[in-house]
Amino acid sequence: MSADIRKLAVWVEETHTEIGKRIDPPTRKAVAVAVIANPFAGHYHDDLSELMEIGAELGGLLGERAVAALGIAPEQAESYGKAAMVGENGELEHAAAILHPKLGAPLRKAVEKGAALVPSSKKMGGPGQDLDVPLGHKDAAYVRSHFDGVEVRLNDAPRADEILVAVAVTDSGRPLPRVGGLTHDEAEGKDGLR
């Protein structure tokens, strides 16, 4: 792997009750995070292909770890998202280079299919700062019950010359969804929208 990884973290969030109502089965979100050295920190570079390749590596690694943390088969994943926070010696384009050109294909393989765009966010920040990872249905963007997000934070990352990269995968939508629209069971996943 070409990514210089300082730290990996994985956790699962389960919601068992919401506003006094039992959620059965619980809704679950897994997040896998890598903290990597930013090879371009402190210097402008036109060619960001090294970060694009790192994105491809991390898409597979983090996607597989998130699916494994949920203890599900890849096809049982229902939604996904990605985010990156670049330290102060980097630039937002470094996060974009990791997230956009090549991270998606290996993540889609890790969750089997993934016809919809992978929701994403990027920001500049420092150690302990929150990073929101947006979530959307992996095969049909119009499934409103899966519009969601999950927050990640590591107390020591990203340092000035690092990038924190996060991938989130769920086995369900929000607890108690009731805003209508296309349901998970109705989604066909042919065009990424419906």
Image (cartoon, helix red, strand yellow):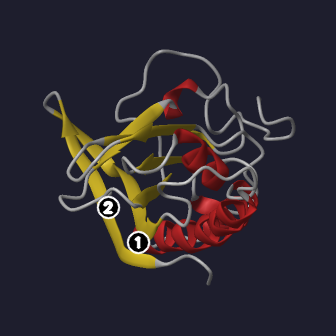
Image x and y of residue 134, in percent: 48, 37
- Foreground residue among 40 and 187: 40
Compared to 48, does 34 lie above or below?
A: below
Along the horizontal axis of the image, is 142 left or right of 40? right
Q: Is residue 147 left or right of residue 141?
A: left
Q: Residue at 25% of width from left, 46% of height from top?
A: 15
Q: Which mark is residue 69?
A: 1
In the rendered image, is residue 135 in sight?
no
Q: Earlier in the sequence, mark 2 or mark 1?
A: 2
Residue 18 position, x and y percent, is: 21, 33
Disc 2: which residue: 12
Q: Amino acid at mark 1?
A: Ala
Spatial CA span between label 2 and label 1: 7 Å
Is the residue under label 1 in contact with that under label 2 (CB below 8 Å)? yes
What number of labels is visible? 2
At 54% across and 67% down in the image, what residue appears?
39
Residue lying at the far bottom in this picture: please name it: 1
Report whether 23 appears left or right of 98: left
Q: In the rendered image, which quarter contains the C terminus?
A: top right
Residue at (65% x, 45% y) in the render: 138
Secondary structure found at label 1: helix
Q: Quadrant of residue 76?
A: bottom right
Label 2 element class: strand
Q: Which image quarter: residue 189?
A: top right
